[in-house]
Amino acid sequence: MSSLAQAATIDLNRTERIKKSNSVAWQKRVLNVANVLFILIWAASLLPSRYAVEMRNGLKDFKAFGVALIIIEAVFIISNGSEKRNRAQRDIVGFVYAFLLIWEVGVSRLNLLPFAFVPAPENVFYVFFDDYINILEGFRSSMILIILGVFLALFFAVILGTLVGWVPRLTNAIFPVVKAISTVPPLIYTSYIVLIMPTFFLASLTVVFLSVFWGSFMGSINNTAFVEKKVINSAKVLNMKTLPMLFKIIIPFNLPRIINNLPINLATALMTLTAAEMIGASSGMGYYVRVALTYANYTKAIAGIIFIGLVVSLLNIIIEIIKKKFVTWEY
Amino acid sequence: MALIEIKNLSLTYETEKETFEALSDINLEIDKGEFVCLIGPSGCGKSTLLGTLEGLLEPTKGKILINNDEIHGPGSDRAVVFQNYSLFPWMSARKNVAFAVIESKRGYKKIKKSEAYKIADEFLEKVGLSEYKNKQPGELSGGMQQRVAIARALACDPEILLMDEPFGAIDAKTRDVLQQLLLKLWAEDKEKKTIVFVTHDLEEAIFLADKIVFMEPKGIKKIIDVNIKRPRLKENMLGNDRYRTLRSQLVKMFGNDDEEIILTGGAGI
């Protein structure tokens, strides 16, 4: 009897505690620095603008900037993880808002910086409304090149690297050479490749391919040469031939490392591609920024840069998801 | 006639700087269905000797005959249990076993996937891991991983089971359980497998083996018949006179200087 009552009280206490911790969590999620900054940005937008008064082409409507803010806030509120992750998220969003607030107040409202070079956030975000066709076209053509280039580079790098790493004589002969080549930044020969290739598509593909290939090739040789000996021995005692050994044992074993390196590879590819696009291209995200810079349209240039940043972040998030799903072990 | 015949076997490691003779002129015969333990101080070449039986190491001189055929490289007549981390980490326990069943018979016999998985399930049940069959090695404890490794080796249905310090990295209590399990699985087979088991643990050797091959650097010092009745139970061992005599005899053979090595062990090469 008494134990039952006790159990009931404990249960009650527990639900109360959960309720309490829930309400605390809710308070933290609503009342935090990030959200205060969020409101401050909106409040600032109501102040009179010196930028609009002093600049010829004036201040664009707040709506694009507002939509961007609402999207950030929505993602921020919807995503909910562990307490540690939430805190990190609050900090990140807080920083972003702080930056946007300074930008909004310093440029749009007080016009403290030379307006010809530092456009207002309203105008920058308005570009996404105004010019989204060109931006998306650039996105499409850059993405095709990056995904195709990275895929081809990894495909050949992993297969060739595994073969070379498996045969000690090949490793000894090729590894030093590859090591030397892979230290040369692809940016250096980018303009040369753009020059010698018949089309810009092929040139960019080659540039992206080379920017990822050498490093991954070297990594693959290295990975293969140093696969855990016991795993190899257990495969060897199953009397596996060389090719099944490479494709069923070595490559699966190295797969997590390959996926772990993907963000670096994508970043390198994007960097090289945008650089290549700035030398000679007719579309692409880098091209978009270059054209904007050429015409001294810094509003568009900054919008393009922000867009590239967003794309890279998005790619990294996708890779994280792939990693969680497919890499369930770590050696 | 013996199942395994090791004849005048020598093995020399060659590095750039020096050559090192690990085994010198070894002769040993192992009968069918026999449980043999190789024991000796670290660096005596017991793991090297097992490596030549596995087919992973090529002898410099001499040869090994199994069923009167000289061996070159690994074969489906042998399966190996290594010390640890030998499972394929990206495969579930079940897949690990099934994969080994299919691969080890490749070229001799075509085994369907469904059949291999059935065999895998059967052997994982034998080692008591049915519940964990879909877990990956990283999610299993060291002892469980070794159970999977044993299941994997037995599922390939080899004539000879080679075990290279399989319980060396496992805590004492789990080791006792696994030793009992191994003996049980070995005894319940219709046609008993021949087991060659490398260990640095004297008590493990006496408990498991029919015959103990005591090695000294490069060669065999002595071959000792254990002569303890089966089935053996771990808890009865200390009360067994033969066990105690053997134990003190073996400790003496290791020599007092080496006692530390016996107790702490060493993985050897």
Image (cartoon, rainbow, N blue to C red):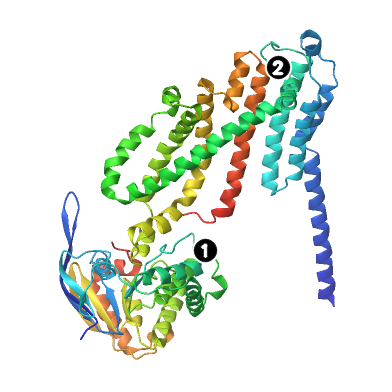
Q: What residue do we see at 82% from left, 15% from top?
A: A49
Three-letter code, disc 2:
Pro
Q: Is residue A13 visible?
A: yes
Q: CA distance from mark 2 to mark 1?
A: 54 Å
Q: What residue do we see at 68% from left, 35% from top?
A: A92
Residue reaching furthest to the bottom = B229
Q: Which image quarter is the C terminus of chain B in?
A: bottom left
Where's residue B68, x and y in %? 20, 79
User: Could you say which quadrant of the image residue A185 lies in?
Assistant: top left
Residue placed most toward the observer, A131 or B218: A131
Three-letter code, disc 1:
Gln
Chain of residue at mark 1: B
User: In terms of secondary structure, where does tag 2 sit?
Assistant: loop
- Residue placed under numbered mark 2 in the picture: A119
User: In terms of secondary structure, where does tag 1 sit?
Assistant: loop
User: Could you say which quadrant of the image residue A87 lies in?
Assistant: top right
